[in-house]
Image: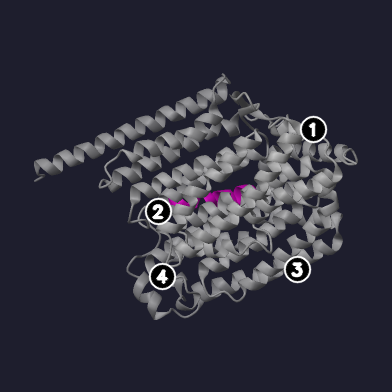
Amino acid sequence: MLTEQTFQKETRKHLLIALLIVILAGSTMIAFGIAFNNFKYPLLSTLIFFPVLGSLFIFFLNGQKEEVIKLTTLVIAIVEFILSIPLYLSFSKTSPQMQFTEKYLWIPQWGISYSLGVDGISVLFVLLSSLLTILCVLVSWNEINKKIKEFYICLLLTHSAMIGVFMSLDIFLFYIFWEAMLIPMYLIIGVWGGPRRIYAAIKFFLYTFIGSLLMLVGIIILYLHTGTSDILKLTQFSYPYKMQIWLFLAFLAAFAVKVPMWPVHTWLPDAHTEAPTAGSVILAGILIKMGAYGLLRFNIPMFPEATLALKPLMLILSVIAIIYGALICLVQIDLKRLIAYSSVSHMGLVTLGIFALNHQGIQGGILQMINHGIITGALFLCVGIVYQRSHTREIAKYGGVASIMPIYSAFFMVFLLASIGLPGTNGFVGEFLILLGAFKAWKLMSVLGATALIIGAAYMLWLYEKVFFQKTNPYINENIRGYGDLNSREIVTLLPLLIAVFWIGFYPADILSFLDLSVKELLNHFNSMIGVGK
């Protein structure tokens, strides 16, 4: 028989679940109402501040009620994703202009506004961030076992700051969100990370903060020169050539660190290795995309003469990153570190496409940013899942995992093949467009970039053979067999990314249609401004 205490506990649990179902149903109705009725609603502000309010609500929850905290955070993340659906359903692909715009005068003395909007480029990163936040909550369910309330608060605040970066249309607002992201991410690495978490967190903070300070100098110079902080207006000014060069380098200091480009990439492997799984997914899926997004939003449209002059340098640095990242993966002994260095290589491919400065290259670079977030995020999720069972990331200690966890092995294989660009997966489409654009810009750089893809296939297939197909290691047999294959929560975590791999792989037009006009507008503006600043 159930005791009265147990009965009350079960009753509270079912009431909570019923309440959460009502909240999800209500948010779904609101989202579709916004999408199809097309009434004025501050959707972007809602997406930014709803997780902040959610984190404030979690702050006042009893820290001992861990399941309630986890479930509440999951519902907040799901509602956030549901509320982002109108961005997909109502976004007009026939216009390159900013949409869902909001603008309120913030600091009138300085002409600074709270100004938000999304175009075909930024809207995709908001959607991706909302999806990955849900998966981060799910993968952290059993992994995070200390200061649980504080962890989920940091996770939600990181999400708010990141999407704020992609939505900002005022340069000072952009900088505030850019810097705000550092604090919760620093805590996620430094508090819930591995043995060398403090070192990795400090290194991450210093690299990104120093680069950001140089960008702040560039922002102040822009403001003093133009008298406006409106990003769209700043792109319409023509700046003297020498000024463009210095401003390009000032902004590049922040964006190159975040990408990360060679040689300012060394913080990334340490941060990835020491961060908890959710931290690695955020870093790979969204945070490092902010650097490449900054190059597209600031460097190319604002400083076209400098971009053209420094284009050979940027292409060379991109190819160095591609080859260096791929080669160093061949000697890694840690699962996470190998995937981290593969990110250096893949993001080098992204910047190669961007600085090809043609339609195929830029479109492929942006698409590959989305693809990288899906694929590498999924690979980090996979590593986190097996690490919870084995408590090791040392490749040499694995072997025969396919015989113990066949479903997990199938998921990992799909994401691995997508990473090396197998036709039919999303990785192939992005890589093809980048190399096509790079070939038009500089044939040698395209060929060198393509050779690194062969190295990528080599280290990824070597990794799979070592971990899944070799003779079963007694250590793994002892630590994994008792857990069994993927449970339902883990399958639900990986399934959306699996669907995305094949959806974009077989039907890339759905994503490319968002990008087409925005990329054309960017290139038309870039070409029209060439020579104006001289």
Q: Nearer the viewer, mark 1 or mark 2?
A: 1
Q: Residue 191 appears at what percent x and percent y? A: 40, 57
Query: In screen coordinates, is 420 left or right of 402?
Result: right
Secondary structure under badge 3? Answer: helix
> In x, y percent, where is residue 199?
49, 64
Q: Residue at x 57, y 48 (%)?
A: 500
Residue 499 lies in the magenta stretch: yes
- Earlier along the polypeptide chain: callout 4 or callout 1? 1
Q: Which residues are magenta?
A: 492-504
Q: Secondary structure at mark 2?
A: loop
At label 1, the amino acid type is: Gln
User: What distance separates the C-alpha of mark 4 from that of mark 2?
Assistant: 23 Å
Earlier-in-chain disc, 3 versus 1 = 1
Counting residues from the start of the chain, the first of labels 3 and 2 encountered is: 2
| Marker disc for residue 140 | 2
Is label 4 in contact with label 1 (beta carbons under 8 Å)?
no
Residue ID for mark 3: 451
Q: Is residue 508 visible?
A: no
* Residue 238 position by quadrant: top right
The mark found on residue 417 in the picture is none
Residue at the spot of label 1: 236
Which residue position holds label 4? 404
Asked if disc 3 and disc 2 are in contact, CB closer than 8 Å, the reply is no
State which quarter of the image contains the C terminus. Answer: top right
CA gap between label 4 and label 3 equals 35 Å
- The residue type indicated by label 3 comes to Thr
Q: Are marks 4 and 3 in contact (CB under 8 Å)?
A: no
Residue at (8% x, 46% y) in the render: 1
